[in-house]
Amino acid sequence: MDIIKLQGTDKKLYELIAPLVLNPAVLRQNNNYPFKTGPKYTWYIAIEKEQILGFIPIKQTSVSSLMINNYYIKGDNLTILDKLLSEILANINSDIELWATVHKRHVQSYKLKDFRTHIEWKNYERMLYF
């Protein structure tokens, strides 16, 4: 499995991700919340043999803050999530805050990567990387 990094307006991003983000099953996994992109986004995409296994878009919300607000992991495979998070953490500066809105079913995986819960909701937790 490889992890590729693309900017939010990269043409290749649209080619790779469009079939997934328009798929009703993928949207259901994301609680029917639409995936967003734009110039302030960087996408980390797990790919193997030309098949997308998952992705995490990150939005730069300020000069010193990034936000993971939605993501897709095929079959909720925690190995894919772990590899994506490892790649993201290896690519961010230590002086930047990284926030994440995390599905309840993935909270433990984020905790293993040193995220801590800041706010709890019914279906999600807002977490901060330390």
Image (spheres, helix red, strand yellow):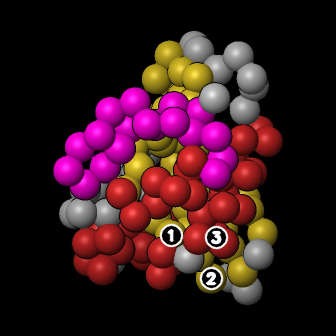
Q: Taking the image as drawn, is residue 74 in sight?
A: yes
Would you place residue 74 above or below residue 92 in this image? below
Disc 3 on helix, strand or loop?
A: helix
Asked if 75 appears above or below 67 in the picture, the reply is below
Q: Quadrant of residue 48?
A: bottom right
Q: Are marks 2 and 1 in contact (CB under 8 Å)?
A: no
Kindly check if marks 3 and 1 are in contact, taking CB atoms under 8 A apart as contact.
yes
Query: Who is closer to the viewer here, 55 or 90?
Result: 90
Q: Is residue 81 magenta?
A: no
- Residue identifier under label 1: 73
Mark sitting on residue 51: 2
Cα–Cα gap, marks 2 and 3:
13 Å
Q: Mark 2 and 3 residues: CB-CB less than 8 Å, in contact?
A: no
Under mark 2, the amino acid is Gln
Between residue 113 and residue 84, name the one nearer to us: 113
Disc 1 residue type?
A: Ile
Q: Tell me where residue 104 sits by quadrant.
A: bottom left
How many residues crowd mark 3 within 10 Å: few (<14), some (14–19), many (20+)?
A: many
In the image, is residue 38 above or below residue 45? above
Tell me where the magenta segment starts and ends, as one range: 112-129
Q: Nearer the viewer, mark 2 or mark 3?
A: 3
- Residue 125 pos. (x, y %): 35, 44
Alpha carbon separation for disc pair 2 and 1: 12 Å
Q: Nearer the viewer, residue 70 or 43?
A: 70
Q: Say which residue label 3 marks.
A: 80
